[in-house]
Amino acid sequence: MCNITTIHPDRLKWSTPENVKAWYDIVKETALSRGLAVVNPDYSVSEPDSPEILWKHPDRVKSCDETGLTMDMTDNKKDRANKSVTVRGRKCEVIAQKSSYRFCAIGGSTASAQSLPPMLIFPGTSFTLGQAMGGPKSSTGL
């Protein structure tokens, strides 16, 4: 069984073949004019997997996406504060806490198919300078 979700209506209206082609043409022309790519001499319109351009440094071309996450590991029912596992004759153990703490996660890959390490962005009000100690000097802002 497939779990299908709907695309946001504004994105669906924009995602016409004409608009997508226009966007790819802009990327292609920009990459060629800036010297980031070259025209593929073996390009064939009749071959669907034949690229029009070849990136000079595909490891420098990044594609990323972000999503909002929460630390809440419980279900959406208000009457449950924690999830627990019970075993007959034993006390239950809490395995997940209810939380309203949210953060952003960013992941992606390069045009050479290398995965990028995830980046987690936490709200600035909860970040302490101690969390950055031991990292690069730029991470402390000092």
Image (cartoon, rainbow, N blue to C red):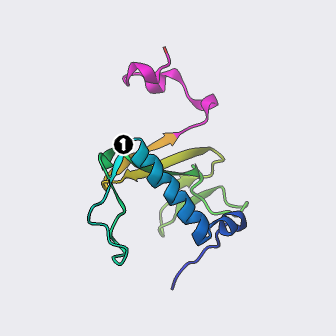
Name the residue: 26% across, 66% down: 42
Under mark 1, the amino acid is Gly
Camera-side residue of 90 and 115:
115
SS at circle 1: loop
Name the residue: 53% across, 65% down: 21
Toward the top, the furthest residue is: 142
Residue 111 percent location from the top left of the image:
35, 54
Residue 138 included in the magenta stretch of the image: yes
Residue 91 included in the magenta stretch of the image: no
Camera-side residue of 5 and 132:
5
Toward the left, the furthest residue is: 42
Q: Quadrant of residue 74?
A: bottom right
Name the residue: 51% across, 21% down: 129
Name the residue: 38% across, 47% down: 61
Residue 27 percent location from the top left of the image:
48, 52
Residue at mark 1: 35
Q: Is residue 97 above or below residue 5?
A: above
Q: Is residue 48 above or below residue 31?
A: below
Is residue 62 toward the left or the right of residue 54 in the image?
A: right
Is residue 46 toward the left or the right of residue 129 in the image?
A: left
Is residue 69 toward the left or the right of residue 11 in the image?
A: left
Q: Is residue 69 above or below residue 12?
A: above
Count of numbered tags: 1
Q: Quadrant of residue 41?
A: bottom left
Asked if residue 92 shows in the view, the reply is no
Q: Which residues are magenta?
A: 121-141
Camera-side residue of 46 and 124:
46
